[in-house]
Image (cartoon, helix red, strand yellow):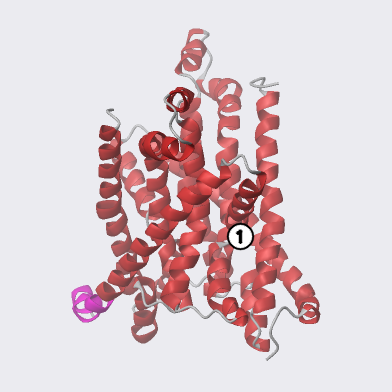
Amino acid sequence: MSYFAFLAEHGPTLLLGTVTTIKVLVCSTILYVIISMIFGLMRLSKNPIIQGIATVYIEFFRGTSLLVQLFWVYYVLPFFGLSLEAFVAGVVALGMNFGAYGAEIVRAGILAVPKGQWEAAHALNFSPAKRIKRIIIPQIFPIILPPAANLTVELLKATALVALVTVVDLTFEAKQINSITWLSAQCFGTALLIYYIMARFALVPFLRWLEVVAARKVGR
Amino acid sequence: MEMGFRWDFAYEILPQMLWATLNTIIAAGVGYAIALVVGLFFLLGQRTPSKIVNVINRELVEFIRSTPLLIQLFFVYFVLPQFGIKLSAWLCGMITIGLHFGTYLSEVYRGALEGVSKTQWEACRALNFSTVYTYRRIVLPQAFPIAIPGMGNYLVGIFKDTPLLSTIGVAELFHAATAVGGYNYRYLEPYTMVGIIFLTLSIPAAMWVRNLEKRVNVAQGKIK
């Protein structure tokens, strides 16, 4: 069977899986950005309890394997009466795991904002919430976007794991086609290519564009 | 079925889990050793004067870095036999992890070498040191401490990615947990124990790396 015949027959299935992969990526990116912001800020709190919770969260999710967390959410939570759909379980596990890594980026980004900005905001009598929201957060984007972009590419790669908890994504479809046709080189090779194209020619250019926009916003 | 955490069951499967942990540690160690060497080869490819080799090397690294390790595992495991190369699941896993993380380590090496100030090279040139001597006595001793955090992080990273090996049938910790869970139809204890074992190994490892970083910096006279 030629490669084109393979593509004609199984290409649409792989593309359907790709759509699911993109959905997982978008949902878990939104979740991880929110979690990063919250825990990154909590990590810098002066309140030892809030700071402690954030530290435990970050250390826990960075200290264990994503696959273990994923299986825990999908197979163990039902023991506690919380059954999540595979897609939701995948997004939750990915979002929480990458949120822990993202929180460290946010923390470093906030610390990298010059001290004078805090002092100036203080001198102008901004409330703490307003100080964070109007002065600090807008300035951290150019700082955190480059490492966050790397993390998001890692996230795209990590979405492949959700196939193992039965989410029908690109990896799942590739495995499925492999077990029917045994054309391993074609189906896994195509899957690798699709991931590569998504990362290299869609996600990375988009994130670079965001970096440029963010840098321009703060006048750099 | 009984709800909640069953301690007697956890205790019963503990020896099995600990044995499997040993396999996980071996897998991480061997994978890391291969990755360290593969990283050197990618570094060489990057630094050779030949433009064609540079480009091929860069594209290859870029490709490996932007595709999931899981599918790379499947690819190596399922495709190589079609070309007559029959390797065990263990070997496939080690090769794939070595290749995948080798690309990351080559970047760590590169960053470390570039972190050594250019004036050091110029000074060595002025003193008429040979290239080998310059590398051995001047550049590498300064590059190494810069590389330590990155190298340590990827050791922990490889350790945390070893559960992926279970998908091609390597009998490491996660594989054992899935097997035990399937046999007894209880996943709560095995998977929870895997999580705890990972935490008890990776947090001290991360702390050790941080400590090592500090010690090397002190030895280099960068901080006191």
Q: Chain of mark 1?
A: A
Which residue position holds label 1?
Answer: A64
Quadrant of image for the C terminus of chain B: top right
The main secondary structure of the magenta stretch is helix
Q: Position of residue B186 (x, y in %)?
A: 66, 84
Which percent across, then down, holds residue B96?
A: 49, 60
Instruction: Answer left or right for B43 relative to A2.
Output: right
Amino acid beneath label 1: Thr
Magenta region, residue range: A2-13
In the image, is A156 to the left or to the right of A110? left
Location of residue A125 (image quadrant):
top left
* Residue lying furthest top: B126
| Residue closer to the observer: A96 or B123 | A96
Residue B38 in sight here:
no
Q: Quick one: A205 or A92, which is closer to the camera?
A: A92
Residue B7 % position (x, y): 79, 78
Picture residue at 44% right of the left edge, 43% below the top: B42
In the image, residue A8 lies in the stretch drawn in magenta: yes
Q: Establish if A126 lies above or below B179.
A: above
Q: Residue at x 30, y 47 (%)?
A: A207
- Is B159 rendered above or below residue A108? below
Instruction: Report the residue that reaches farthest toward the bottom.
Output: B1
Circle 1 sits in a helix, a strand or a loop, which is it?
A: loop
Q: Quadrant of the N terminus of chain B?
A: bottom right
Q: Residues within 10 Å of mark 1 (few under 14, many from 20)?
A: many
Left or right: where B178 falls relative to A211: right
Task: Determine the image quadrant of residue B182.
Answer: bottom right
Whether B3 is among the magenta residues is no
